Amino acid sequence: MELQPNIQTKEKPYVIGLDMGGTNSVFGIVDQRGNILSQTVISTKAYPDVNEYVRAGVNALKPLIEEAGGIDNIKGMGIGAPNGNYYTGNIEYAANLLWEGIVPIGKLFEQALGIPCRVTNDANAAALGELTYGVARGMKTFIMITLGTGVGSGVVVDGKVVYGCDGFAGELGHFIVDRSPEARQCNCSRKGCLETYCSATGVARTARLMLEKSDAPSPLRDLDPDQITSFDVFKAAEAGDQIAKDIFNYTGAVLGHACANFALFCAPEAFVFFGGLTKAGHWIMDPIAKAYEEEILGIYRGKAKLLVSTLKGSEAAVLGAAALGWGD
């Protein structure tokens, strides 16, 4: 199959989105309405040589491209990747990928497919997905907060993602929320970062600490402390466990206070929350809202909505990456 575009073709109806994770990479063909026509998955970690990875990705894409009518129907490709840099098209020093240093992933896929390829980090891709297909559609300024293993963020101002001078602006998960001697160590080497408290792993850490400090009964005590997850805490809260409720109240308070600070630099129309932790529903969202209202500067009060993404978790990352493929 020859993957070379025909420059004489009319408006192209599809783009490719790639959600690159440390374990797996998901490719999807997406139309302008945000429908995913088809998807395929390859193992990221199976390819220590990035050139082999690109070849495997292109081979996996070939039947999907044929199903879409050929490469002439594909306008471009977007990649959401750890430490993806929009300006350079490179992945730069990603800790959870096998490839070390600077990897020109955008250029490699452009050469292999013959179509434009744009790159950004995964949280910015999520923000683009919301802007193009989700609850932020039609908004000019909002902040995306992704609550997963870590806390990611994408900042959109006047309809454009904020990248800063070097492509790495908006790392709000590493905003320091605790400077006490007991501040939690973060994988970034700093202490007290937001993600050490408000990620899924942060919730598990809070659970272990609260169980140690309290003698109150809790179904969480029946679990191996090192194996407790945020979902376990959610199930306990649903069952009426006060310790579980306290865990979410504490987590929500930290995040709500942080968002009140984030609002100061861009006056967002909304905060959009995405990720597994949002499945806790009102247990996490109510304390976020309460803390936000307590801390927000008066002139900003009542202006920003606190929204949960409506994009399906299994599709949002691919859609966000695909949004890049349409170009400016």
Image (cartoon, rainbow, N blue to C red):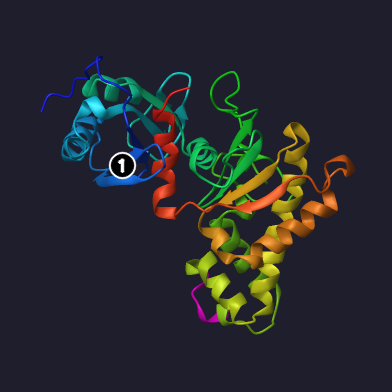
Q: Which residues are magenta?
A: 221-225
Nearer to us in this view, 251 or 212: 251
Across and down, in percent, residue 206 comes to: 63, 63
Across and down, in percent, residue 74 comes to: 28, 29
User: Does 284 lie within the magenta span?
Assistant: no
Q: Main secondary structure of the magenta part?
A: helix
Secondary structure under badge 1? strand
Q: Residue at x 31, y 43 (%)?
A: 25
Which residue occupies the extreme left position in the image?
A: 1
User: Does 223 lie within the magenta span?
Assistant: yes
Q: Identify the image quadrant of residue 263.
A: top right
User: Which of the image's four quarters has the N terminus?
Assistant: top left
Nearer to us in this view, 315 or 55: 315
User: Please, is residue 290 above or below residue 328 in the view?
Assistant: below
Q: Residue at x 71, y 49 (%)?
A: 305
- Residue under pointer 1: 28
Does residue 304 appear anywhere in the picture? yes
Across and down, in percent, residue 201 comes to: 54, 57
